[in-house]
Image (spheres, grey):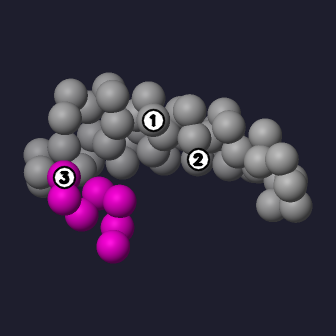
């Protein structure tokens, strides 16, 4: 299931704008072989903040 499947339609475009920005900024820095997952933290923090910004 898509993460935004349960969002009201009015919020989907707004949250996708923020999520796309997160992926553009932090996605290239993620290292798939990072066993500590520390390279994922900036991306996951950004995604968390994106959902907070849309006033769910």
**Dot 1 surroundings within 10 Å: few (below 14), some, or many (20 or more)?**
few
Q: Cβ–Cβ below 8 Å for labels 2 and 3? A: no
Structural distance between the alpha carbons of marks 2 and 1: 12 Å
- Picture coordinates of residue 54, whole percent (x, y): 26, 31
In which quadrant will I find the N terminus? Answer: bottom left
> Does the magenta-highlighted stretch encompass residue 6?
yes
Considering the numbered disc 3 on the image, is that residue within a helix, a strand or a loop? Answer: loop
Number of residues whose C-alpha sits closer than 10 Å to that of mark 2, classed few (under 14), some (14–19) or many (20 or more) = some
Q: In the drawing, does residue 9 fall left or right of residue 3?
A: left
Q: Earlier in the sequence, mark 1 or mark 3?
A: 3
Q: Is residue 41 above or below residue 7?
A: above
Residue topped by disc 3? 7
Residue topped by disc 2 = 23
The reply to whether the C-beta atoms of the residues labelled 1 and 3 are less than 8 Å apart is no
Q: Residues within 10 Å of mark 3 (few under 14, many from 20)?
A: few
Task: Residue 30: give x, y in percent of width and height.
Answer: 77, 49
Q: Is residue 16 left or right of residue 11?
A: right
Main secondary structure found in the magenta portion: loop
Residue 2's tag is none
Instruction: Locate residue 24: give its quadrant.
Output: top right
Measure the alpha-carbon separation of dots 1 and 3: 15 Å
Q: Is residue 41 left or right of residue 52?
A: right
Residue drawn 19% across the image and 59% down it: 6
Residue at mark 1: 48
Q: Residue at x 24, y 63 (%)?
A: 5
From where the camera sits, is residue 36 visible?
A: yes
Element assignment for label 1? helix
Magenta span: 1-7
Q: Is residue 21 visible?
A: no
Tell me if residue 42 is in the magenta stretch. Answer: no
Q: CA distance from mark 2 to mark 3?
A: 19 Å
Which badge, 2 or 3, is on the more N-terminal residue? 3
């Amino acid at each position: 299931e898509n993460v935004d499947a349960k969002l009201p339609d009015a919020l989907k475009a707004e949250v996708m704008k923020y999520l796309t920005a997160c992926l553009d900024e932090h996605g290239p820095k993620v290292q798939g072989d990072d066993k500590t997952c520390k390279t994922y933290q900036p991306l996951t923090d950004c995604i968390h903040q994106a959902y907070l910004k849309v006033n769910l």
